[in-house]
Image (cartoon, grey):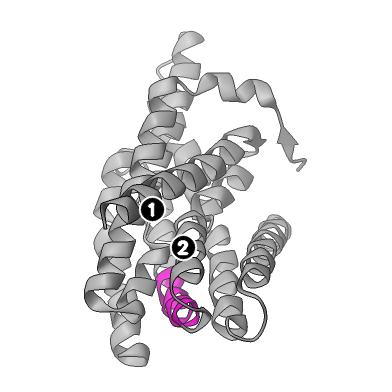
Protein backbone atom coordinates (compact mmCIF):
# COMPACT_ATOMS: atom_id res chain seq x y z
CA UNK A 1 0.00 0.00 0.00
CA UNK A 2 2.72 2.48 1.03
CA UNK A 3 4.85 1.43 -1.94
CA UNK A 4 1.91 2.11 -4.26
CA UNK A 5 1.41 5.60 -2.75
CA UNK A 6 5.09 6.40 -3.13
CA UNK A 7 5.05 5.16 -6.73
CA UNK A 8 1.95 7.26 -7.49
CA UNK A 9 3.52 10.31 -5.83
CA UNK A 10 6.79 10.02 -7.76
CA UNK A 11 5.22 9.25 -11.17
CA UNK A 12 2.55 11.95 -10.71
CA UNK A 13 5.14 14.50 -9.60
CA UNK A 14 7.41 13.71 -12.55
CA UNK A 15 4.69 13.86 -15.22
CA UNK A 16 3.22 17.10 -13.82
CA UNK A 17 6.73 18.63 -13.66
CA UNK A 18 7.43 17.61 -17.26
CA UNK A 19 4.32 19.34 -18.60
CA UNK A 20 5.02 22.40 -16.40
CA UNK A 21 8.52 22.69 -17.89
CA UNK A 22 7.01 22.48 -21.40
CA UNK A 23 4.62 25.28 -20.43
CA UNK A 24 7.57 27.40 -19.21
CA UNK A 25 9.38 26.99 -22.53
CA UNK A 26 6.72 28.41 -24.82
CA UNK A 27 5.54 31.88 -25.72
CA UNK A 28 2.99 33.38 -26.21
CA UNK A 29 1.40 32.75 -22.82
CA UNK A 30 -1.92 31.77 -24.40
CA UNK A 31 -0.08 28.82 -26.01
CA UNK A 32 1.88 27.98 -22.85
CA UNK A 33 -1.46 27.90 -21.01
CA UNK A 34 -2.47 24.81 -23.01
CA UNK A 35 -0.06 22.87 -20.78
CA UNK A 36 -1.99 23.93 -17.66
CA UNK A 37 -4.70 21.59 -18.94
CA UNK A 38 -2.31 18.78 -19.92
CA UNK A 39 -3.37 15.22 -19.08
CA UNK A 40 -0.56 14.91 -16.51
CA UNK A 41 -2.48 13.35 -13.57
CA UNK A 42 -4.50 11.27 -16.06
CA UNK A 43 -1.35 9.86 -17.70
CA UNK A 44 0.18 8.87 -14.39
CA UNK A 45 -3.08 7.38 -13.06
CA UNK A 46 -4.10 5.55 -16.25
CA UNK A 47 -0.60 4.13 -16.74
CA UNK A 48 -0.71 2.73 -13.20
CA UNK A 49 -4.30 1.53 -13.72
CA UNK A 50 -3.47 -0.47 -16.87
CA UNK A 51 -0.33 -1.86 -15.23
CA UNK A 52 -2.25 -2.99 -12.13
CA UNK A 53 -5.92 -3.40 -12.99
CA UNK A 54 -7.20 -3.87 -16.52
CA UNK A 55 -8.16 -1.92 -19.61
CA UNK A 56 -11.86 -1.96 -18.64
CA UNK A 57 -11.09 -0.10 -15.40
CA UNK A 58 -9.09 2.52 -17.34
CA UNK A 59 -11.99 2.84 -19.80
CA UNK A 60 -14.46 3.56 -16.98
CA UNK A 61 -12.11 6.18 -15.52
CA UNK A 62 -11.68 7.77 -18.95
CA UNK A 63 -15.46 8.00 -19.46
CA UNK A 64 -15.84 9.90 -16.17
CA UNK A 65 -12.85 12.02 -17.05
CA UNK A 66 -14.88 13.56 -19.92
CA UNK A 67 -17.11 15.16 -17.25
CA UNK A 68 -14.04 16.26 -15.24
CA UNK A 69 -12.48 17.83 -18.35
CA UNK A 70 -15.69 19.74 -19.17
CA UNK A 71 -15.66 20.99 -15.57
CA UNK A 72 -12.02 22.06 -16.04
CA UNK A 73 -13.05 24.04 -19.12
CA UNK A 74 -15.65 25.97 -17.09
CA UNK A 75 -13.21 26.37 -14.18
CA UNK A 76 -10.36 27.79 -16.30
CA UNK A 77 -12.76 30.11 -18.18
CA UNK A 78 -14.04 31.49 -14.86
CA UNK A 79 -10.48 31.92 -13.52
CA UNK A 80 -9.46 33.70 -16.72
CA UNK A 81 -12.53 35.96 -16.56
CA UNK A 82 -11.75 36.99 -12.96
CA UNK A 83 -8.11 37.72 -13.80
CA UNK A 84 -8.76 39.62 -17.04
CA UNK A 85 -11.10 41.93 -15.12
CA UNK A 86 -8.44 42.45 -12.45
CA UNK A 87 -10.84 41.27 -9.76
CA UNK A 88 -8.24 39.46 -7.63
CA UNK A 89 -4.85 37.73 -7.60
CA UNK A 90 -4.16 34.47 -9.47
CA UNK A 91 -4.19 32.46 -6.26
CA UNK A 92 -7.54 33.91 -5.10
CA UNK A 93 -9.12 33.57 -8.58
CA UNK A 94 -8.00 29.97 -9.05
CA UNK A 95 -9.04 28.86 -5.55
CA UNK A 96 -12.34 30.79 -5.65
CA UNK A 97 -13.22 29.05 -8.94
CA UNK A 98 -12.79 25.55 -7.51
CA UNK A 99 -16.48 25.25 -6.42
CA UNK A 100 -17.38 25.69 -10.12
CA UNK A 101 -15.28 22.62 -10.99
CA UNK A 102 -17.01 20.54 -8.30
CA UNK A 103 -20.47 21.81 -9.31
CA UNK A 104 -20.06 21.02 -13.02
CA UNK A 105 -18.21 17.71 -12.52
CA UNK A 106 -20.72 16.32 -10.00
CA UNK A 107 -23.75 17.69 -11.88
CA UNK A 108 -22.59 15.78 -14.97
CA UNK A 109 -21.81 12.71 -12.85
CA UNK A 110 -25.28 12.85 -11.28
CA UNK A 111 -27.06 13.42 -14.63
CA UNK A 112 -25.10 11.02 -16.85
CA UNK A 113 -22.81 8.67 -14.95
CA UNK A 114 -24.46 7.78 -11.63
CA UNK B 1 1.36 34.93 -33.95
CA UNK B 2 4.51 32.78 -33.84
CA UNK B 3 5.04 30.14 -31.17
CA UNK B 4 8.56 30.25 -29.76
CA UNK B 5 10.39 27.89 -27.40
CA UNK B 6 13.51 29.04 -25.53
CA UNK B 7 15.48 26.90 -23.09
CA UNK B 8 16.80 30.06 -21.40
CA UNK B 9 13.28 30.67 -20.01
CA UNK B 10 13.74 27.71 -17.69
CA UNK B 11 16.30 29.75 -15.71
CA UNK B 12 13.45 32.04 -14.65
CA UNK B 13 11.97 29.19 -12.60
CA UNK B 14 13.69 28.68 -9.24
CA UNK B 15 14.53 25.33 -7.70
CA UNK B 16 11.84 25.59 -5.02
CA UNK B 17 9.24 26.31 -7.71
CA UNK B 18 10.11 23.04 -9.48
CA UNK B 19 9.83 21.32 -6.10
CA UNK B 20 6.38 22.86 -5.43
CA UNK B 21 5.10 21.58 -8.80
CA UNK B 22 6.55 18.11 -8.17
CA UNK B 23 4.98 17.89 -4.70
CA UNK B 24 1.58 19.23 -5.85
CA UNK B 25 1.61 16.82 -8.82
CA UNK B 26 2.48 13.90 -6.58
CA UNK B 27 -0.14 14.76 -3.96
CA UNK B 28 -2.92 15.25 -6.54
CA UNK B 29 -2.08 11.91 -8.22
CA UNK B 30 -2.11 10.11 -4.85
CA UNK B 31 -5.46 11.74 -3.96
CA UNK B 32 -6.95 10.73 -7.33
CA UNK B 33 -5.90 7.15 -6.57
CA UNK B 34 -7.32 7.24 -3.03
CA UNK B 35 -10.67 8.64 -4.27
CA UNK B 36 -10.88 5.94 -7.00
CA UNK B 37 -10.14 3.25 -4.40
CA UNK B 38 -12.67 4.61 -1.91
CA UNK B 39 -15.55 5.60 -4.24
CA UNK B 40 -14.86 3.55 -7.39
CA UNK B 41 -13.57 4.25 -10.90
CA UNK B 42 -16.59 6.36 -11.96
CA UNK B 43 -16.07 9.03 -9.27
CA UNK B 44 -12.28 8.59 -9.39
CA UNK B 45 -12.26 9.32 -13.12
CA UNK B 46 -13.67 12.81 -12.53
CA UNK B 47 -10.52 13.70 -10.59
CA UNK B 48 -8.20 12.85 -13.50
CA UNK B 49 -9.08 16.35 -14.72
CA UNK B 50 -9.11 18.06 -11.31
CA UNK B 51 -7.25 21.41 -11.39
CA UNK B 52 -5.08 20.47 -8.42
CA UNK B 53 -1.88 22.11 -9.65
CA UNK B 54 -3.60 24.93 -11.54
CA UNK B 55 -3.52 27.47 -8.66
CA UNK B 56 0.21 26.87 -8.10
CA UNK B 57 0.93 27.07 -11.84
CA UNK B 58 -0.78 30.38 -12.57
CA UNK B 59 0.42 31.93 -9.30
CA UNK B 60 3.96 31.28 -10.52
CA UNK B 61 3.11 32.83 -13.90
CA UNK B 62 1.86 35.97 -12.11
CA UNK B 63 4.92 36.06 -9.87
CA UNK B 64 7.37 35.73 -12.80
CA UNK B 65 5.64 38.50 -14.75
CA UNK B 66 5.60 40.82 -11.70
CA UNK B 67 9.31 40.22 -11.08
CA UNK B 68 10.08 40.94 -14.73
CA UNK B 69 8.28 44.30 -14.54
CA UNK B 70 9.86 45.19 -11.18
CA UNK B 71 13.33 44.72 -12.68
CA UNK B 72 12.34 47.40 -15.19
CA UNK B 73 11.23 49.66 -12.32
CA UNK B 74 7.51 49.15 -12.94
CA UNK B 75 4.84 48.01 -10.49
CA UNK B 76 3.51 45.30 -12.83
CA UNK B 77 0.66 44.08 -10.63
CA UNK B 78 -2.11 44.54 -13.19
CA UNK B 79 0.03 43.34 -16.11
CA UNK B 80 0.95 40.18 -14.15
CA UNK B 81 -2.72 39.36 -13.54
CA UNK B 82 -3.54 39.92 -17.21
CA UNK B 83 -0.76 37.55 -18.32
CA UNK B 84 -2.01 34.99 -15.81
CA UNK B 85 -5.54 35.46 -17.20
CA UNK B 86 -4.25 34.87 -20.74
CA UNK B 87 -2.53 31.65 -19.59
CA UNK B 88 -5.81 30.53 -17.98
CA UNK B 89 -7.52 31.25 -21.30
CA UNK B 90 -5.01 28.88 -22.89
CA UNK B 91 -6.04 26.25 -20.35
CA UNK B 92 -9.65 26.59 -21.57
CA UNK B 93 -8.43 25.47 -25.02
CA UNK B 94 -6.27 22.75 -23.47
CA UNK B 95 -9.42 21.48 -21.72
CA UNK B 96 -11.05 20.89 -25.11
CA UNK B 97 -8.06 18.67 -25.91
CA UNK B 98 -8.52 16.97 -22.55
CA UNK B 99 -12.15 16.12 -23.40
CA UNK B 100 -10.85 14.51 -26.64
CA UNK B 101 -8.16 12.62 -24.65
CA UNK B 102 -10.79 11.19 -22.29
CA UNK B 103 -13.28 10.37 -25.06
CA UNK B 104 -10.64 8.42 -27.01
CA UNK B 105 -9.66 6.55 -23.85
CA UNK B 106 -13.30 5.68 -23.11
CA UNK B 107 -13.68 4.37 -26.66
CA UNK B 108 -10.40 2.48 -27.18
CA UNK B 109 -9.41 0.96 -23.81
CA UNK B 110 -10.11 -2.75 -24.19
CA UNK B 111 -10.09 -2.63 -28.00
CA UNK B 112 -6.36 -2.13 -28.60
CA UNK B 113 -3.24 -2.36 -26.41
CA UNK B 114 -3.50 0.01 -23.41
CA UNK B 115 -0.11 1.63 -24.03
CA UNK B 116 -1.19 2.42 -27.59
CA UNK B 117 -4.37 4.05 -26.26
CA UNK B 118 -2.35 6.23 -23.86
CA UNK B 119 0.05 7.29 -26.65
CA UNK B 120 -2.76 8.00 -29.14
CA UNK B 121 -4.83 9.92 -26.57
CA UNK B 122 -1.82 12.10 -25.63
CA UNK B 123 -1.15 12.86 -29.30
CA UNK B 124 -4.85 13.70 -29.76
CA UNK B 125 -4.79 16.02 -26.72
CA UNK B 126 -1.88 17.94 -28.26
CA UNK B 127 -3.41 18.06 -31.76
CA UNK B 128 -6.87 19.20 -30.57
CA UNK B 129 -5.44 21.75 -28.09
CA UNK B 130 -3.12 23.31 -30.69
CA UNK B 131 -5.91 23.32 -33.31
CA UNK B 132 -8.28 25.02 -30.82
CA UNK B 133 -5.59 27.62 -30.00
CA UNK B 134 -4.95 28.26 -33.72
CA UNK B 135 -8.68 28.61 -34.45
CA UNK B 136 -9.13 30.94 -31.45
CA UNK B 137 -6.51 33.27 -32.91
CA UNK B 138 -8.43 33.50 -36.14
CA UNK B 139 -11.89 34.11 -34.70
Q: Give the number of the disc on residue B38.
A: none
> Of label 1 and label 2, which has the lower sequence position?
1
Residue B23 position in % (x across, y down): 34, 39
Q: Residue B38 colored magenta?
A: no
Can residue B132 be seen here?
yes
Disc 1 designates what residue?
A: A8
In percent of width and height, residue A98 lies at 28, 58
Residues rendered magenta in the picture: A57-70
Asked if both marks, 1 and 2, belong to the same chain, the answer given is yes
In the picture shown, does residue A70 fall above or below A21? below
- At 49% across and 84% down in the image, what residue appears? A56
- Horizontally, residue B83 falls left or right of residue B28, namely right
Residue B45 versus residue B31 in the image, above or below: below
- Chain of the residue that carries numbered disc 1 in the rendered image: A
Left or right of B105? Residue B128 is right
Residue appearing at x 59%, y 43% in the figure: A32
**x then y, percent, for residue B129:** 64, 60
Mark 1 and 2 residues: CB-CB less than 8 Å, in contact?
yes
A39 left or right of B24 in image: right
Tell me: residue B137, above or below residue A111: above
Q: Which image quarter is the N terminus of chain B in? A: top right
Amino acid sequence: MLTEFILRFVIGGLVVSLFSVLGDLFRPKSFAGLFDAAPSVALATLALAVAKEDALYAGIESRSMIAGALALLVYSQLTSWLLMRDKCSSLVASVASLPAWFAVAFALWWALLK
Amino acid sequence: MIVKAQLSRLKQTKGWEYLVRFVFGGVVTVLAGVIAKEYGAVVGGLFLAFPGIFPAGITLVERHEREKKRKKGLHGERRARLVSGVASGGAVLGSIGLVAFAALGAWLFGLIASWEVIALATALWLAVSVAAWWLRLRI
